[in-house]
Image (tube, grey):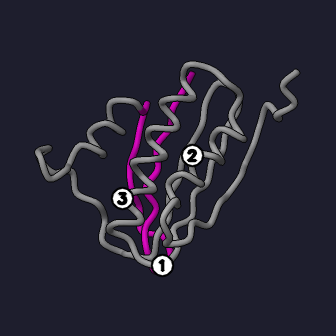
Amino acid sequence: MDTRPATYDVELRIARTDGGAGLARDLVRDTLRPGEWRDDVLLVVSELVTNALLHGLGKPMLRLVGTSTQVRVEVHDDNPKLPQVRESGPDGGWGLPLVGRLAVAWGTYPDGVGKTVWCQLAG
């Protein structure tokens, strides 16, 4: 029997060490009930957390808020520069377009000393 709650609001501060994106994926697996759309959440969390670790400052914060049918993913970091979608190629640029394809909506906003990148997914 799956004992995970039907609604949730969880956060994870991600250290700038190897394995940070893996810890973020573990939080998704531990929080969301199994289902085909959970794989999409795992993918966007990997992309957004990896971007925050590569391009952000400070320790990124991942937040998942949702129910069994929808989730909002937020990743905050201390770099005020908002991400820019760039042309995809051998050196990257695939992440944000992928998030845009999988999410119902996504965006960014200034947040304190940095920014938050968010997306909304529905199952």
Q: Is residue 105 magenta?
A: yes
Q: CA distance from mark 2 to mark 1?
A: 20 Å
**What element does badge 3 sit on?**
helix
The earlier-in-sequence mark between 3 and 1 is 3
Instruction: From the viewer's side, name the closer residue of 47 and 78.
Output: 47
Q: Which residues are magenta?
A: 103-123
Q: Could you say which disc has been placed on residue 58 in the image?
A: 1
**Position of 17 compared to 65: left or right?**
left
Q: Three-letter amino acid code at disc 3? A: Asn
Which residue does the numbered mark 3 point to in the structure image? Answer: 51
Crowdedness near tag 2: few (<14), some (14–19) or many (≥20) residues, C-alpha within 10 Å: many
Q: CA distance from mark 3 to mark 2?
A: 14 Å
Secondary structure mostly seen in magenta is: strand
Q: CA distance from mark 3 to mark 1?
A: 13 Å
Quadrant where the N terminus sits is top right
Which residue does the numbered mark 2 point to in the structure image? Answer: 25
Q: Three-letter amino acid code at disc 1? A: Gly
The earlier-in-sequence mark between 3 and 2 is 2
**Position of 50 compared to 23: left or right?**
left
The residue drawn where x is 57% and y is 45% is 25
